[in-house]
Image (spheres, helix red, strand yellow):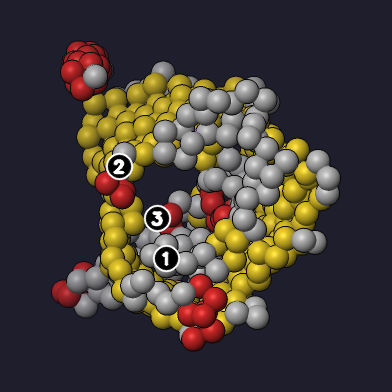
C-alpha cells in the first residue's frame, strides 16, 4: 500500500513537472505556500498547522464526590498537527487533502473533489467536508477567538461524507448551502454500515450590513439538520470548554430507539472595527419510538483588538478569515507588538428533558490572544465551569500555534 501511494505521488509530481515546462509555474509565499501557472488555470496550496496545548485543572469537593477526584491536575498534548494539499485545475475543478496526526493516529479532515462556476448552483463538493451548520464550526480552528469551540459543538460532528452544494447571491450578501451526507466516522470519513442512515443539512445566511470602509458587518444565519442514524442511538456529552479536561460533567447517556434527530441553529455575528460580538443558539429535538426529547445550548462572546486590528468575513460558508497584525512582533527595529485581542464568552448547555437528567452547565471563558505575525499565535484561556446542583471547576490553558 505504501509503495502504491509513493508511485501515485511520483506520477502526479512528474505530470506537474512536464506540464510546467510548457506553462511555467510561479512559486510564492503569501501567508502560506502557493504555486500557480502563468495563466492561473492551475493553482496549488500546501501547508499545515501545529497547535501545542498545556492545561492546569481543578474542581471543588462537590464535583469530587459526584464524579470522583481528578486523575490529573495538569496535562499537555499536541492538539492539532496537520498537513494539507489543495488546488484548482482547469479553472473549475477543485480538490483538497487535509490530514491530521493527533493522538498517535492519522485522521482525515477535508478530503474532497469539487466543481465551481456552475450556473445557479455555484459550487459542488463531494467527499469529507464540513456540514453547513454552526458559524463557529465553519470558522477554521486557526482563526477562532478561543482555544476550543463552545458547547454547541457537541451535538453533531463538524465534518461528514456526502455531497455539498453552496453559492452566494446578491453581491455575496445571501449565502445558501445544503448537503446530503452519511453518518461518517470522524477519523476515516467512512460509513461502512450506512444502510438507511443519512443526514440532510441546510443553511441560509445574510449580510444586512457589509460596510468594508467602516469595517462593519452584521451576519445572520439559520441552519437545520435532519439526522437518521442506522443504529437508532444518539447522545450528547460535554466537557468544560477545554480539550484536555478529562471529565464530561453533563451527559445525556445513550438514547435508544431513536427514529430521527432534528437540529436547529440560529447565528448572529456583528463586527465594528476592532470589536466583535458573536452568538448562536442550538436546539435538538430527539424523536424516539415512544417520546420526544428537547435539549439546547447557546453561547455569546465578545472580543476586542487592543492594537486596532479587525477580523474579516471570509465567506458565508467559511466564517472568519486570517488576522493580519498591523505590525509583526519584532518589526520596526524590534518595536513591533504584534496584535493583541481580549475575549469573553458565556455558554450554557442543558441536557435535561423529561426522564433524561443529563445535567446543566454554564462556562465562562476569559481569553487573551497574542498574534505575533499572520501565522503565529499564543493563546491564554481561563475557563470557569459551573455545573448546576453539582459544583465548579477551573481550567487554565495555553496554546502555542503556527500555521502555514
Looking at the picture, how far across and down is residue 48, in whole percent? 29, 45
For image coordinates 55% across by 45% down, the residue present is 157
Instruction: Identify the mark nearer the N-term, 3 or 2.
Output: 2
Label 2: few (<14), some (14–19) or many (≥20) C-alpha neighbours in 10 Å:
few
| Residue 357 drawn above or below residue 231 | below
Is mark 3 in CB contact (under 8 Å) with mark 2?
Answer: no
Instruction: Identify the mark nearer the N-term, 1 or 3.
Output: 3
Looking at the picture, how far across and down is residue 308, in whole percent? 44, 74
Say if residue 65 shows up in the picture: yes
Q: Secondary structure at mark 2?
A: loop
* Dot label at residue 142: 3
Q: Secondary structure at mark 1?
A: loop
Compared across the picture, whether 250 is left or right of 398 comes to right
Residue holding disc 1: 246
Instruction: Identify the mark nearer the N-term, 1 or 2.
Output: 2
Between 24 and 305, the one nearer to me in the picture = 305
Q: Residue furthest left?
A: 333
Looking at the picture, how far across and down is residue 236, in whole percent? 61, 55
| Residue 136 drawn above or below residue 191 | below
- Give the CA separation, mark 3 to mark 2: 21 Å
Number of disc labels: 3
- Give the CA separation, mark 1 to mark 2: 20 Å
| Residue 55 drawn above or below residue 297 | below
Residue holding disc 2: 105
Compared across the picture, whether 346 is left or right of 22 comes to right
| Quarter of the image that includes the N terminus | top left
- Give the CA separation, mark 1 to mark 3: 23 Å
For image coordinates 31% across by 49% down, the residue present is 102
Looking at the picture, how far across and down is residue 287, in whole percent? 78, 45
Q: Quadrant of residue 54?
A: bottom left
Amino acid at each position: 500500500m505504501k509503495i502504491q501511494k509513493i508511485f501515485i505521488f511520483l506520477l502526479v509530481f512528474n505530470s506537474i513537472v512536464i506540464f510546467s515546462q510548457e506553462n511555467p509555474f510561479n512559486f510564492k509565499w503569501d501567508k502560506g505556500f502557493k504555486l500557480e501557472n502563468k495563466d492561473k488555470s492551475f493553482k496549488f496550496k500546501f501547508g499545515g498547522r501545529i497547535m501545542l496545548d498545556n492545561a492546569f485543572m481543578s474542581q471543588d469537593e462537590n464535583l469530587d464526590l459526584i464524579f470522583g477526584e481528578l486523575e490529573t491536575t495538569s496535562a499537555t498534548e499536541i492538539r492539532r498537527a496537520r498537513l494539507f494539499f489543495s488546488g484548482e485545475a482547469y479553472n473549475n475543478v477543485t480538490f483538497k487533502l487535509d490530514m491530521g496526526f493527533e493522538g498517535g493516529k492519522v485522521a482525515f479532515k477535508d478530503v474532497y473533489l469539487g466543481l465551481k462556476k456552475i450556473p445557479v448552483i455555484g459550487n459542488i463538493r463531494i467527499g469529507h467536508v464540513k456540514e453547513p451548520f454552526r458559524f463557529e464550526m465553519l470558522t477554521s480552528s486557526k482563526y477562532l477567538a478561543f482555544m476550543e469551540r463552545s458547547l454547541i459543538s457537541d451535538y453533531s460532528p463538524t465534518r461528514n461524507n456526502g455531497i455539498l452544494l453552496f453559492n452566494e447571491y446578491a453581491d455575496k450578501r445571501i449565502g445558501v448551502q445544503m448537503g446530503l451526507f452519511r453518518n461518517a466516522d470522524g477519523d476515516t470519513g467512512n460509513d461502512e454500515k450506512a444502510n438507511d442512515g443519512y443526514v440532510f443539512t441546510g443553511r441560509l445566511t445574510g449580510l444586512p450590513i457589509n460596510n468594508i470602509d467602516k469595517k462593519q458587518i452584521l451576519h445572520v444565519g439559520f441552519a437545520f439538520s435532519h439526522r437518521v442514524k442506522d443504529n437508532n442511538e444518539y447522545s450528547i456529552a460535554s466537557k468544560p470548554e477545554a480539550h484536555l479536561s478529562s471529565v464530561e460533567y453533563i451527559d445525556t447517556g445513550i438514547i435508544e430507539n431513536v427514529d430521527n434527530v432534528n437540529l436547529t441553529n440560529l447565528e448572529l455575528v456583528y463586527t465594528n472595527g476592532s470589536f466583535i460580538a458573536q452568538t448562536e443558539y442550538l436546539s435538538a429535538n430527539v424523536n424516539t419510538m415512544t417520546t420526544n426529547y428537547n435539549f439546547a445550548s447557546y453561547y455569546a462572546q465578545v472580543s476586542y483588538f487592543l492594537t486596532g486590528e479587525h477580523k474579516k468575513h471570509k465567506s458565508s460558508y467559511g466564517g472568519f478569515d486570517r488576522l493580519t497584525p498591523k505590525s509583526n512582533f519584532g518589526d520596526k527595529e524590534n518595536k513591533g507588538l504584534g496584535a493583541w485581542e481580549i475575549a469573553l464568552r458565556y455558554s450554557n448547555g442543558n441536557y435535561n428533558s423529561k426522564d433524561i437528567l443529563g445535567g446543566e452547565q454554564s462556562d465562562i471563558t476569559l481569553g487573551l490572544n497574542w498574534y505575533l505575525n499572520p501565522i503565529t499565535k499564543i493563546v491564554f484561556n481561563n475557563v470557569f465551569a459551573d455545573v448546576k446542583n453539582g459544583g465548579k471547576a477551573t481550567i487554565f490553558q495555553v496554546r502555542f500555534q503556527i500555521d502555514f
